[in-house]
Image: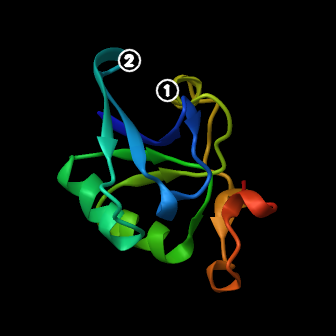
Amino acid sequence: MKIAVTYENGMVFQHFGKSEQFLIMEFEQTKLLNKSLLSANGKGHSALVTLLANAEIDTLICGGLGQGARNALAQAGITVISGALGNAEAAVDAYLNGSLKDSPSGQCSHHGDHHTCSDHSCS
């Protein structure tokens, strides 16, 4: 299983479409096989879905994302766990032990308002 986490300075970055890099952690059951950083290379929103799909990601852990991104990720076969906060590796551990679940508060519906998810309740 390959898990990607929106990533900035060790923490879960709060806006999927503005993520500059992802922490990638690959597991066999719960055993960590590999950990690396994947650069977004300045790509945004829809290009990030392709980037993650090409990296064979199974699950994305993030702060917030819009419904369009959520739909595109689902179409690519990537499970979304939104609403995560704090340390990125701790978020992965929480997901693996079942204590991190997808949260509706990780939904952004205001992209036309020029806000970021960390501006208000979607972080």
Q: Are marks 2 and 1 in contact (CB under 8 Å)?
A: yes
Give residue 88's quadrant in the image. top right
Give residue 2's quadrant in the image. top left
What number is the disc on residue 66? Answer: none
Looking at the picture, does residue 96 appear above or below residue 20?
Answer: above
Q: Position of residue 6 (x, y in %)?
A: 48, 45
Q: Residue at x 33, y 53 (%)?
A: 40
Residue corresponding to mark 1: 96
Q: Position of residue 44 (x, y in %)?
A: 40, 67
Looking at the picture, does residue 85 appear above or below residue 44?
Answer: above
Distance between the alpha carbons at the discs numbered 2 and 1: 7 Å
Quadrant where the N terminus sits is top left
Three-letter amino acid code at the position of disc 2: Thr
Extreme residue toward the top, this view? 31
Q: Nearer the viewer, residue 18 or 31?
A: 18
Q: Nearer the viewer, residue 42 or 79?
A: 42
Mark 2 falls on what kind of element? loop
Circle 1 packing at 10 Å, graded few (<14), some (14-19), many (20+), is some
Sequence-wise first label, 2 or 1: 2
Q: Is 33 situated left or right of 60 in this image?
A: left
Residue corresponding to mark 2: 30
Mark 1 falls on what kind of element? helix
Q: Position of residue 50 (x, y in %)?
A: 25, 63
Circle 2 packing at 10 Å, graded few (<14), some (14-19), many (20+), is few
Three-letter amino acid code at the position of disc 1: Leu
Give residue 9's quadrant in the image. top right
Extreme residue toward the bottom, this view? 112
